Amino acid sequence: GAGVSQSPSNKVTEKGKDVELRCDPISGHTALYWYRQRLGQGLEFLIYFQGNSAPDKSGLPSDRFSAERTGESVSTLTIQRTQQEDSAVYLCASSRLAYEQYFGPGTRLTVT
Amino acid sequence: AQSVTQLGSHVSVSEGALVLLRCNYSSSVPPYLFWYVQYPNQGLQLLLKYTSAATLVKGINGFEAEFKKSETSFHLTKPSAHMSDAAEYFCAVSKANTGNQFYFGTGTSLTVIP
């Protein structure tokens, strides 16, 4: 009965390094979303997975960003060659179709 | 296309006063509408949702919102603000009956003055 979990909770990395962020959705939730939240700003949609359909990648800011999801389980967001502007909290959410989303606690990424 | 506009990025109210946070949406199809709250250094938590049933929706912590189709609005209210209500509030819209994107507003930061 656990909620959405994300790991790590905090990540500090050097500019130019690759990072992987993980999201474990609620069991049975077919939809999974990634958002970015910069300090003091709203949520920026990144990518959306729905079941076995092709993901909606329209929000990914550059080709340095990619995400994968295995079936209806874990998802990984990868940022290659990190830049300082990538510093933000990355939020994952899962839902059953268009019903409310359940958010994880987020991963705070700091690029130095 | 769907979008959400939250008027007022910062709202301050006195403790005990009415809280009114504004949200207007645009949607080409009947929408589902949501309000989320984000306390400092925490994730987002659902306050309430409208999914085409009663237009006046009651949520947690004494908050409620009214769906007004004619005004394309879904404003969040609480009769009496409490110090613990200080947080960031986000309005969101999704298409009804589809597994599709959620669109979030830019958020409104609520400050409660003692």
Image: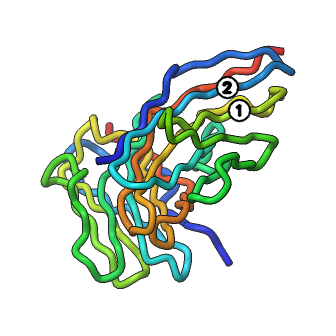
Residue B14, above or below A43: above
According to the picture, the residue beneath numbered tag 1 turns out to be B77
Q: Would you identify the image quadrant in which residue B101 lies?
A: bottom left
Query: Residue at coordinates 18% horizontally, 50% vertically from top-left?
Result: A81
| Image position of B35 (left or right of A17) | right
| Image position of A50 (left or right of B25) | left
Name the element at disc 2: strand
Report the amino acid beneath label 1.
Thr
Residue B95, above or below B106: below
- View extreme (left): residue: A63
Q: Would you identify the image quadrant in which residue A71 lies?
A: bottom left
| Image position of A88 (left or right of A85) | right
Name the element at disc 1: strand
Q: Determine the chain carrying the residue at label 1.
A: B
According to the picture, the residue beneath numbered tag 2 turns out to be B20
Report the amino acid beneath label 2.
Leu
Q: Of marks 1 and 2, which one's residue comes earlier in the chain? A: 2
- Say if mark 1 contacts mark 2, CB within 8 Å: yes
Q: Which mark is residue A90?
A: none
- Mark yes or no: residue A42 visible: no
